[in-house]
Amino acid sequence: MVHIAALPGTPSNTMKIDAIISEALRETLILSEGGVDAVMIENMHDRPYLNRNAGPEIVSAMTAVATEIRHAFKIPLGIQILAGANKEALAVALAAGFDFIRAEGFVFGHLADEGWMNSDAGELLRYRKQIGAEHIKIFTDIKKKHSSHFISSDISIAETAKAAEFFLSDGVIVTGAATGKKASVDEVKMTKNSVEIPVIIGSGIDVENIQEYWDFADAFIVGSSLKKEGNWENEVDKSRVIKLMQKVNQLKETHHF
């Protein structure tokens, strides 16, 4: 994960776009040289987030950042725009030549920090078709972090994953309760046993626990544990990246992935 610095127009913004781009390129380079398989960018510093609403200043800034990263790196690249601005993320991905997006609120409505969020699978996949972006994968959160799922508590995570697969998700993302919090190993197993599409761990992965999930996940989104002091708000720590990828390479040699 590269958490882009707060963008113009957001409460925490202090940097000009050139500086924001430079910082994103620097962190992407650290991750790339450290051996990660892909990099995803996200506007996490733009808090508080708008509910499925990213203004033109956010879309244009993310496009500027994404385009520079794409020009500099050949690895797979993805994007998420908070909160739930999935169409905007898809549009940026198409313009910048990115490979995938992370989409929250794909199936089943839920109560998020930003308020009630309806599912958008039908609208999002029609939009992808309309703009000619079907080559861009959409990986979708299920029962995502920072949200209440009481209204759908009678629907298991396995059934939620099946619904996402039925609605043509390209892969489901399982998370813990919040950024940096571990996902339940049992929930990951249940999800993996329920669907044929990829299962991705979306929070809480670090060098100490990745082995617990290795046999039950197809990919890992790692942010907080690769930052200085393990805090998502800090910059990427090269030594943490190296240690994680050393562990990953060991697991690749000794375990089926």
Image (cartoon, grey):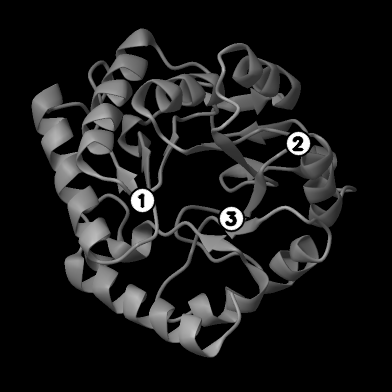
Residue extending farthest right: 154
* Image side of residue 150 versus residue 69, left or right: right
Q: Quadrant of residue 226?
A: bottom left
Residue density around tag 3, few if under 14, some if 14–19, many if 20 or more, within 10 Å: some
Give the residue at mark 1.
Answer: 1
Q: CA distance from mark 1 to mark 2?
A: 25 Å
Circle 3 residue: 177
Give the percent coordinates (x, y) of residue 250.
Answer: 42, 86
188 relative to 203 in the view: left or right = right
C-alpha span from label 3 to label 2? 25 Å
- Circles 3 and 2, Cβ within 8 Å, touching? The answer is no
Where is residue 75? Give x, y as percent. Answer: 34, 50
Label 1 crowd bin: few (<14), some (14–19), many (20+), radius 10 Å? many
User: Is the Cβ of the residue at disc 3 closer than 8 Å to that at disc 1?
Assistant: no
Number of on-image labels:
3
Disc 1 marks a residue whose amino acid type is Met
Q: Earlier in the sequence, mark 3 or mark 2?
A: 2
Position of residue 169 in the picture relative to residue 232 (left or right): right
First-in-chain label (3 vs 1): 1
Q: Is residue 140 visible?
A: yes
